[in-house]
Image (cartoon, helix red, strand yellow):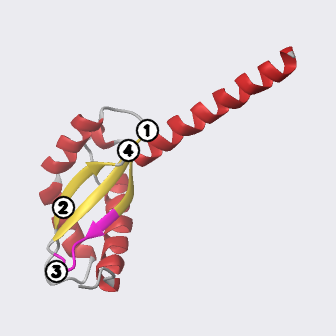
């Protein structure tokens, strides 16, 4: 079974762009302020979309609940903007990759600094 679905990727990218715009311009819920849509994965039949997001501030669980509560509004707005027969069900998930990357980068910086201190002490 092929794992490459170009249409699903294109639809996912369109959804990502439109959701970012809707969240920025039209959402009034303060819990979703500072949310960045990092990726959208749409399944091949275009019925479900996993929406990954990152945060500048706030608690991931609370923001996930707020986004799930707003899913109906978001789908309605997407249906106005996209030329799709059916807008996928939206499933929101906190994107931990940025946080994990920052944590790894910080650990590397600490290791380099410690190594430099050891070489300086010798």
Looking at the image, residue 112 lies above or below residue 19: above
110 in magenta: no
* First along the sequence among labels 3 and 2: 3
Helix, strand or loop at disc 1? loop
Looking at the image, residue 1 lies above or below residue 94: below
Helix, strand or loop at disc 2? strand
- Residue 90: mark in rendering: 2
**Observer-nearest of 101 and 60:** 101
Q: Which residue has dot 3 on it? A: 45
**Depth-wise, is mark 3 or mark 2 nearer the camera?**
3
Which quadrant of the structure image shows residue 20? bottom left
Quadrant into which the C terminus falls? top right
Whether pointer 2 and pointer 4 mark residues with C-beta atoms closer than 8 Å, the reply is no
- Can you name the residue that lies furthest to the top here? 121
| Residue 15 in picture, x, y percent from top left | 31, 69
Give the Cα distance between marks 2 and 4: 18 Å
**Depth-wise, is mark 1 or mark 4 nearer the camera?**
4
* First along the sequence among labels 1 and 3: 3
* First along the sequence among labels 1 and 4: 1
In the rendered structure, the answer to whether residue 55 lies left or right of residue 113 reads left
In the rendered structure, the answer to whether residue 19 lies left or right of residue 108 reads left
Looking at the image, residue 71 lies above or below residue 34: below
Q: Which residue has dot 4 on it? A: 96
Give the Cα distance between marks 3 and 4: 26 Å
Helix, strand or loop at disc 3? loop
Q: Which residue has dot 1 on it? A: 56
Could you classify mark 2 by the number of other residues whose Cα lies within 10 Å: few (under 14), some (14-19), or many (20 or more)?
many
């Amino acid at each position: 079974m092929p794992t490459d679905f170009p249409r699903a990727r294109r639809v996912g990218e369109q959804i990502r762009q439109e959701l970012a715009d809707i969240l920025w311009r039209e959402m009034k819920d303060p819990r979703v302020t500072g949310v960045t849509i990092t990726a959208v994965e749409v399944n091949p039949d275009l019925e479900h979309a996993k929406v990954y997001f990152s945060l500048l501030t706030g608690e991931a669980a609370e923001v996930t609940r707020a986004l799930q509560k707003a899913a109906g509004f978001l789908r309605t707005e997407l249906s106005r903007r996209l030329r799709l027969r059916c807008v996928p069900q939206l499933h929101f998930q906190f994107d931990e990759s940025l946080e994990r990357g920052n944590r790894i980068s910080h650990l590397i910086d600490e290791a380099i600094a410690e190594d430099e201190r050891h070489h300086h002490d010798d």
